Image (cartoon, grey):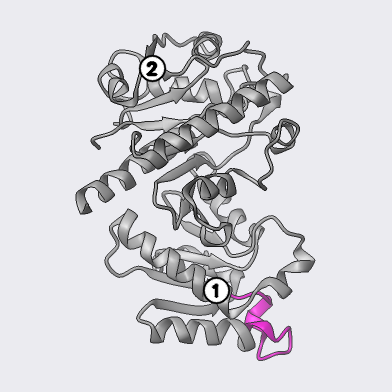
Amino acid sequence: MAKPLAVSLGDPAGIGPELLATAWAAREVHHLPPFFAVGGAGLLAAAAARRGLDVPIRHVADPAEAGTAFAEALPVLGDDDGPYDPGQPSRQGAILALASLTRAAQLAVSGEAGGLVTGPIAKSRLAEVGFTHPGQTEFVAAACGVSAGNAVMMLAGPSLRTVPLTVHVALAQVPGLVTRELIERKARIVAAALRRDFGLAHPRLAIAALNPHAGEDGRMGEEDRAIIAPAIAALREAGIDASGPHPADALFAPHNRASFDAALCMYHDQALIPLKALDFDSGVNITLGLPIVRTSADHGTAFAIAGKAEAHPGATIAAIRMAGDCAGRRELAA
């Protein structure tokens, strides 16, 4: 990578700051690309100390300087800061989290940073200080000028990649939201991203069924044969290697996982349960369909264990590494 990654703090009362400091301390062991934090120099130092880490902090004036400083210190761009009060979310902390996210996204969109890694936020807290998006995915999409419907969330780990076609909606709403257009549009975005960002020349997509046993020819619901199967046929006609609808209870069995590169699932838990069961401490949330690379650790703020040195850094490390890998592929292809 020619340019370092921008990393937003997340909520400063959560586990984001301590895991960011931990990732820098483990940069050589995990061969991490250069990155810098946006804001929070003092609280990052305090978070590192609480975790018993020796993490020198260095203020930098621009991302290019961060690339040079990274080997010797954790670079921090910007003067925004606040107290480190783990487990005690506050309005001041939410303001800092939003400022960090906004600046980090701007740096990635402008091309000054090689990509964006976002720390975990408390959405309800951000809403109190003017955050109007359902989540960070939609916020980053808007910053890129991409409609929320064309920003696709993929969860990726060492064992599995999954995509929920519907995300934060009630389960009762899912059948009405699953359409041929939704499946085909998001499958095309996923296939293109797997080629561009993951280097897969011929990505294989497995499409999960909505109903048990893929509906059993309509006995357990019509959606699988009336909506999902025709969408898969259209994708195959367009040259995309898509298969299904696969009964979800068997799709993620070990002997089946080797047959696809990503599984497109009909609803949130259908995608996230297998990913978290297999790769809980190394799962990455990556947003597909954007002009920039954006990843985040697939976990939340975990206020209850913040500052106790109990949070596992694996997902944060994986998110930084994956962002670097994807950004590097884009640079090589440019």
Instruction: Check disc 2 and report its element: helix, strand or loop.
Output: strand
Q: Is residue 248 above or below residue 333?
A: below
Quadrant location of the N terminus in the rendered image:
top left
Residue for point 51% across, 8% down: 49
Residue matched to label 1: 183
x, y percentage for residue 244?
A: 51, 79
Residue for point 43% across, 53% down: 290
Q: On the rendered structure, is 144 left or right of 68?
A: right
For residue 208, say whether it is visible.
Answer: no
For the residues labelled 2 and 1, the Cα–Cα distance comes to 42 Å
Residue type pointed to by label 1 = Ile
Q: Residue furthest bottom?
A: 217
Q: Residue furthest right?
A: 172
Q: Is residue 296 above or below residue 146?
A: above
Q: Residues within 10 Å of mark 2 (few under 14, many from 20)?
A: many
Say which of 292 and 190 sits in front. 292
Q: Which residues are magenta?
A: 208-224
